[in-house]
Amino acid sequence: MTKLYVGNLPYSYTETNLREMFAAFGNILSANVISDRSSGRSKGFGFVELEDDSAAQTAIAELNGTEIEGRKIVVNEARPMEQRPRRQY
């Protein structure tokens, strides 16, 4: 299983769009578009988990740098989430 970061997505993109984009590369375990908590609007990036590691590498090679709705997307392996202190309001 490989988790991919997908950045610079059009703000109109949904999880369904992500699933459609990666469907040709293999079995998708999850697809998430990250949204702002207060507005609910997409932050322009998301994550896709593919079951097969070689399919994930193929997806990176074929999709990284492609243009969607005038935006060049970034596709690479996701890094582990960093522990950050919670922000105080």
Image (tube, rainbow, N blue to C red):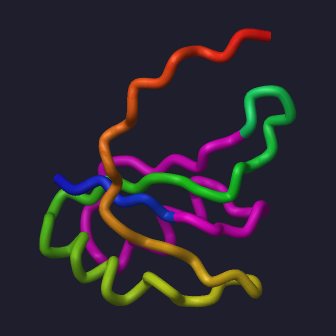
Image side of residue 19 versus residue 29, left or right: right
x, y percent for residue 44: 68, 58
Residue occupying image coordinates x 66% and y 56%: 14
- Image point 25% across, 82% down: which residue? 58
Residue 77 image point, x, y percent: 31, 62
User: Is residue 57 or residue 16 the one in the foreground?
Assistant: 57
Vertical order, 55 against 61 (above or below): above
In the rendering, at what x and y percent does residue 70 appear?
A: 75, 87
Looking at the image, the residue that sits furthest to the right is 39
Q: Is residue 80 above or below residue 79?
A: above
Question: As displayed, is residue 35 above or below residue 89?
Answer: below
Q: Is 13 part of what is drawn in magenta?
A: yes
Q: Nearer the viewer, residue 41 or 14?
A: 41
Q: Which residues are magenta?
A: 7-35
Q: Quadrant of the C terminus?
A: top right
In the image, is 21 to the left or to the right of 67? Answer: left
Please state which of residues 74 and 55 is positioned toward the viewer in this rendering.
74
Q: Position of residue 65 (x, y in %)?
A: 51, 87
- 66 left or right of 50? right
Residue at x 50%, y 70% (from the top left corner):
20
How many marks do you count on the picture? Answer: 0
